[in-house]
Image: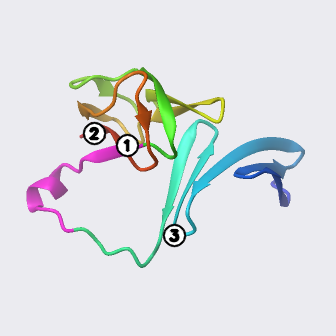
Amino acid sequence: MTGEARLTSAAPGTFVVEVDGTRQIVYVAGTAEDQWAFWNGRIFRSESPSAPPTSRSAAARAVPAQQLSSPMPATVVRVLGRPGLRVAKGDPVVILEAMKMELPVRSPSEGTITAVHCHEGELVQADQLLVELE
């Protein structure tokens, strides 16, 4: 049985979510129109509903490519993936460091890494493309 959730602001961009006595930390960054949340090793993104849809060719729709981007300004600590590597859903492919915390960027689904656009020690900005998957 799930009880009522309680959300408390712990610091700018840091929230504590408590449900049934269990506390978890959620980090949020971005603008009101484009927010990112980091929770439980995963990154979630909310885009403005007014953003125009992008058109893609029929070939691109047949095998959708996935692009993993940095959720916030950070430093690339480790690149765990390389082109051609098969990954499972949830596998970390890049480890970032921001606000003295390590942020694993995980594969959202099973696939093959087609390109890596970052290197260890690089400073990346929010929304910067890190890895492409098919």
Q: Which residue is mark 2?
A: 132
Of the numbered discs 2 and 3, the one sitting upstream in the chain is: 3
Instruction: Mark 3 vs mark 1: give the one in front.
Output: 3
Q: Is residue 5 left or right of residue 110?
A: right
Does the segment drawn in magenta span residue 57?
A: yes
The three-letter code of the residue at mark 1 reads: Leu
Instruction: Check contact, mark 3 vs mark 1: CB within 8 A.
Output: no
Q: Is residue 57 left or right of residue 4?
A: left
Seen from the viewer's position, the closer of residues 19 and 7 is 7
Q: Is residue 62 left or right of residue 2?
A: left
Instruction: Check contact, mark 2 vs mark 3: CB within 8 A.
Output: no
The three-letter code of the residue at mark 3 reads: Glu
**Mark 1 burial class by Cα count in 10 Å: few <14, some 14-19, many 20+:** many
The three-letter code of the residue at mark 2 reads: Glu
Image height check: is 57 above or below 101? below
Question: Which picture quadrant has residue 22?
Answer: top right
- Residue at the image point whose x is 34% and y is 23% from the top: 81
Magenta highlight range? 55-69
Instruction: Check contact, mark 2 vs mark 1: CB within 8 A.
Output: yes
Q: Position of residue 77 (x, y in %)?
A: 48, 22
Q: Which residue is mark 3?
A: 33
Q: Which residue is mark 1?
A: 68
**Mark 2 burial class by Cα count in 10 Å: few <14, some 14-19, many 20+:** some
Of the numbered discs 2 and 1, the one sitting upstream in the chain is: 1
Name the secondary structure under disc 2.
strand
Does the segment drawn in magenta span residue 2?
A: no
Of the numbered discs 3 and 1, the one sitting upstream in the chain is: 3
Q: Position of residue 11 (x, y in %)?
A: 79, 49
